Image (tube, helix red, strand yellow):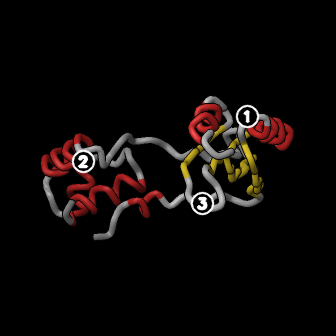
Amino acid sequence: MDDVDRKILLKLASDARTPFKSIGKEIGVSTDTVSKRYRKLKQSGIIQKATLILDLKRANRGMMAVLGIKSEAGHIWEVAREIEKLEEVFQFGKAFGAHDFIIFLISRDLEQLEAAIDKVSRIPNIKNLDVSIITGQLVNYPERQVPMS
């Protein structure tokens, strides 16, 4: 990945619908160059998909919690399979340290969030569950995903 690729990724990270012509003009390359680079980045797996970021409150999904989960020894993947089934799970990742997994739950209100946390707590082989409810605006920085060098 070179500077041209990084510049393309930065533009797309801030708005994935930016026309290739606009990107090319801004970074000083042709539309065809942007198109070819985009295809290469997609084929290599660097770009997995273009998506959107919702204002969760306006989309009636304004409550969010972060859960840290520690599994019983030897049951980590069983717990992971159960977590994946929950429709309230917004993001989910394997972790090292105090927790085996970190998950983000989203819901429309506190009652629904409590029900989702209860579902998680009933998954077999969870040794420990730490819950933090996000009370302020969650800020996304998609451009920070792009490596600077």
Residue contact at pointers 3 and 2, CB within 8 angstroms: no
Give, as a three-letter code, the residue at label 1.
Answer: Pro
Percent of width and height locating residue 4? 20, 62
Please rate how many residues cluster around mark 3, counting C-alpha atoms within 10 Å: few if below 14, some from 14 to 19, many from 20.
few
SS category of the residue bearing label 1:
loop
From the viewer's perspective, is the residue at label 3 or at label 1 nearer?
Answer: 1
Quadrant where the image shows the C terminus: bottom left
Q: Name the residue under label 3.
A: 139
Query: Disc 3 and disc 1: Cα gap in Å?
Result: 33 Å
Quadrant where the image shows the N terminus: bottom left
Sequence order check, earlier mark of 3 and 2: 2
Q: 85 left or right of 64?
A: left
Residue lying at 64% horizontally and 32% vertically, measured from the top left: 82
Q: Name the residue under label 2.
A: 41
Percent of width and height locating residue 124? 73, 34
Q: How many labels does the image show?
A: 3
Residue lying at 77% horizontally and 58% vertically, measured from the top left: 135
